[in-house]
Amino acid sequence: MNTMKRIIIIAMVALVSGGAMGYGEVYPANNDVRDTESLQRGAQLYFENCVGCHSLEYARYNRVARDLKIPEDLFERYLLDADRPIGDLMTNALSPALGSQFFGTEPPDLTLVARVRGTDWIYTLLTGFYKDDSRPYGVNNALYNNIGMPHAMVNQQGLCAEAPGADGCQEFAFEGSMSPDEFDLAMVDLTNFLDYMGEPIQLERQRIGWFVMAFLSVFLVFAWLLYRELWKDVK
Ligand code: HEC
C-alpha cells in the first residue's frame, strides 16, 4: 500500500512539474543585472520591438530612466512615444480584447515574467524561433511549441531553418541584419532588462549587500580587538 501511494505521488509530481507543460530544454542566459550598459541596450530593444504588444504596466518610465542611468531628456526623445508623460505606467494601446482577436491569445504583460518563468526560460524562448510553414506566422519555437507570438526580431536575427539546439541556430532560411553573436548578445540584454524589470530593487539590494559585508568585516576586526582587550586580565 505504501509503495503504491509513493508511486502515485511520484507520478503526480512528474506530471505537474514540466512534463505536462510540454516546454523544451532550457539554456542558461548568464545575464548580469549589475551591467548597466546591458540593461540600457535591453531597454532600447524592448521599446523598439516588444512594447507594442507587451505592456510593463506595473512600472513607470521615469523609474526605468533613473535606475538605468538614462538621462530623462534622451529617454523622452528616443524611447518614449511623443504623447506619453515620463511619469506614466508603461501600459500600451493594444487592448486585451483586440490582442486576443489578433493573436488568438492576449500578449501578456511582461513586468513580472522573469519572476514567473525565470531568465533562462526567457532567453531560450527568444533564441528559439524557427521556420515552420504549418504555423499561422510561419514560425514555431523550440522551447514553446506552437507559440501564438510572431518572431518579433526576425529582421535582426533572420530565420532559422530548423529548431535551434544547445549550439544555437545552425542553418538559416534567410539571414538578418545581425550576426549570430550580435543577436545572441541582444537577447541576453533583453533578458537582462526583463530580469531587472521583475525586481527593480535587486540593483539596490546588491549595492546594500556589499556595503553590509564591508561593514561587517571592519566590525569583526574591532570586535576581536575588544574581545582580546577584555579577556586579557581574566586569563
Ligand atoms: C505582434 C505582437 C508581439 C510582439 C511584437 C512581441 N510579442 Fe511576445 N507574445 C505575443 C503573444 C500573443 C504571446 C502569447 C503567446 C502564447 O502564449 O502562445 C507572447 C508571449 C511572449 C512571452 C511568453 C510569456 C509567457 O509567460 O508565456 C515572452 C517572454 C514574450 N512574448 C517576449 C517578447 C519580447 C521580449 C518581445 C520583443 C522582442 C516580444 N515578445 C514581442 C505577442 C507579441
Image (tube, rainbow, N blue to C red):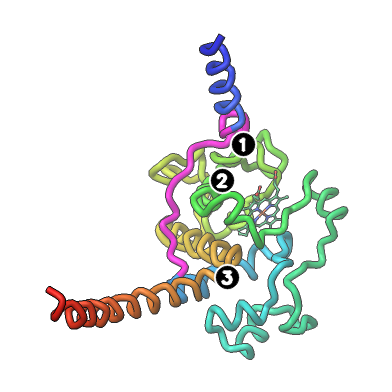
Query: Along the line of sight, which residue is nearer the eye, 6 or 10?
Result: 6
Q: Which residue is identified by label 3?
A: 200
Q: Which residue is identified by label 1?
A: 145
- Total numbered labels placed on residues in the image: 3
Specify whether 132 is left or right of 120.
right
The residue that appears at 68% across and 37% down in the rendered structure is 135
Highlighted range, magenta = 17-33
- Which quadrant would the C terminus be assigned to in this image? bottom left
Measure how far apart labels 3 and 1 are at the Cα level: 31 Å
- Residue 64 drawn in magenta: no
Would you identify the image quadrant in which residue 42 lies? bottom right
Q: Which mark is residue 197?
A: none
On the image, the x and y values in percent for residue 104 come to 80, 44
Cβ of disc 1 within 8 Å of ligand 1?
Answer: no
On the image, the x and y values in percent for residue 167 come to 38, 44
In this rendering, is residue 3 above or below 53?
above
Measure how far apart labels 1 and 2 are at the Cα level: 10 Å
Q: Which element is circle 2 on?
A: strand
Decide: few, some or many residues near mark 1? Use Cα within 10 Å; few <14, some 14-19, many ≥20.
Answer: few
Q: Earlier in the sequence, mark 3 or mark 2?
A: 2
Q: Can residue 83 be seen here?
A: yes
Q: Which element is circle 3 on?
A: loop
Query: Please, which residue is most extreme toward the bottom here?
Result: 73
Kind of residue sitting beneath label 2: Phe
The residue that appears at 54% across and 78% down in the rendered structure is 68
Q: Which residue is identified by label 2?
A: 129
Q: Earlier in the sequence, mark 1 or mark 2?
A: 2
In this rendering, is residue 35 above or below 120?
below
Specify whether 100 is left or right of 46.
right
- Which quadrant would the N terminus be assigned to in this image? top right
Specify whether 218 is left or right of 82.
left
